[in-house]
Amino acid sequence: MIDGRSRRYLIETWGCQMNQHDTEKMAGILAGLGYVPTADDREADVILLNTCSIREKAESKVYGRLGRLRRLKMANPDLFIGVVGCVAQQVGQGIFSRAPFVNLVMGPRNLSRLGELIEEARREGRSIGLARDDDPIEFPFGTMARASGPKAFVTVMEGCNKSCTYCIVPFTRGREVYRPATEIMAEVTQLAQEGYREVEFLGQNVNAYHHEGSDLASLLRMADRIPGIRRVRFTTSHPGHLKRTIMDSFRDVPTVCNHLHLPAQSGSDRVLKAMNRGYTRSKYVSKLEFMRRSVPGMAFSTDLIVGFPGEGPRDFGETLQLMRDIEFDQVYAFAYSPRPGTEAARLEAIVPREAQQERLGELLSLQESIQTRRNRTLMGQVFEVLVDGVGRLDNGLLRGRTRCNRIVHFPGPAQRGVLIDVRITRAQPHSLLGEVLPNSRPA
Ligand code: 5AD
Ligand code: SF4
């Protein structure tokens, strides 16, 4: 308490779902220490920047943000500023030289020490907590301040043992560490009792999960048996670890949703090799085709990188062709960005920025037309929708997701967390409009 009021914290989050979930963990730790959240940086006592370093742009945003925080700190010297997450891990001590007013630098593998490191930093002016490689990670059980339902993230593993030549994640998140299945299921059971209907298993290389005889397919089957859990998803997967048992779970395990995010990165075998992805285009395609044949309405999303060093117009053409062949339901596309310490950063055949942007534009417009066409075919169809709240647009519509991960907006009195049947009445490239079926009884 300060002056009779609780101390306030603000955590700003960049990056992937793992980072979002780390924020929930840190928020839980701070709540346990008596802090309350605030959205206003001027009234915060503690501000943590939970950072992402996947591309240079994500990293430079952090420095931009620190510029403003420096002014806040000048006005309020008691303000505690922490840089946490992937940039913190990557830059380490270097953060203090760029921004000497920062009190704490902490990597993503040290989350459970947050309280202790804040104490130490308050005592000594500043502190640093960095872990790499196989340091054990603790998952602060039951101490998370989760975003309210109906979906909850559940960490099943941390780190990544792959060595894709463009990627900084193995440097920031360390080697793979797996959580025991019993612990994971205890958390899922508790979430179900708290009313969550959907869980999403998280890991940088989630389908490589293995621990004492359990693999991801076993986790999916175990979660399916927990009363109250209606939907299970997992992210993010590597095509090389997509075993038959996992592919079969989409067909055989009722709660496993019919959507898979499977980053392809490129459609060119030459580029895939230079990226050290460990699969060919045809291996990737055959897995998707197998699932399309065995799982009704199976939806796929992917990540693609354009302008990787040495990517010629022909390689890029193969990526476009992959998109036409598969017709992904959603594509996240990125211009290649060299990251310090990675193998690809040493490659010389750089694709100029303008060519990267041109390719990115071409790719996105192709995807827009694919999505428009695909979504139109859904008109009139009925989907089970899990209501997750009010849409972002101020039009009074509710919003939910289908099992195939499409966003649907619809008018109606339904409440957050219920499952209802919705008929699609209008299709846009990135969202769908629908109406609740009159005889749809919320479940
Ligand atoms: N440059 C551009 N995109 C990258 N990604 C990972 N590393 C880089 C990089 N250096 C993309 C990949 C990954 C997604 C999370 O970010 O497509 O799947
Ligand atoms: Fe960004 Fe990767 Fe770290 Fe997630 S794990 S925050 S994507 S660098």
Image (spheres, rainbow, N blue to C red):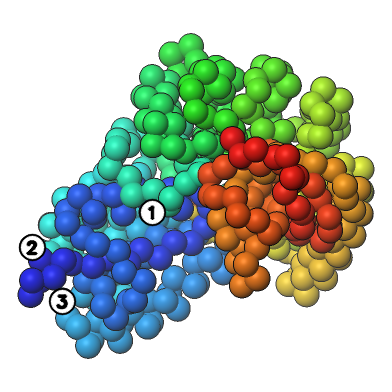
The numbered mark at residue 23 is 1
Q: In the image, what residue occupies the spot 39% across and 36% down?
A: 194
Callout 2 secondary element: helix
The correct choice, above or below, for 267 with respect to 212 in the image is below
The correct choice, above or below, for 240 with respect to 72 in the image is above
Q: In the image, what residue occupies the spot 21% across and 71% down?
A: 45
Which-is-in-front pick, marks 2 and 3?
Answer: 3
Sequence-first tag of 2 and 1: 1
Callout 1 secondary element: helix
Could one spot residue 125 in this view of the protein? no
Circle 2: residue type: Arg
Residue wearing tag 3? 78
Sequence-first tag of 2 and 3: 3
Q: In the image, what residue occupies the spot 85% across and 43% down?
A: 381
Residue situated in front as seen by the camera: 214 or 270: 214
Q: In the image, what residue occupies the spot 92% across and 43% down?
A: 325
The correct choice, above or below, for 10 with respect to 115 in the image is below
- Quadrant containing the C terminus is top right
**x then y, percent, for residue 76:** 19, 83
**x then y, percent, for residue 37:** 30, 64
Callout 3 secondary element: loop
Circle 3: residue type: Asp
Residue wearing tag 2? 123
Question: Is label 3 within 8 A of ligand 2 (CB to nearest ligand atom)?
Answer: no
Sequence-first tag of 3 and 1: 1
149 horizontally vs 230: left or right: left
| Number of numbered discs visible in the structure rendering | 3
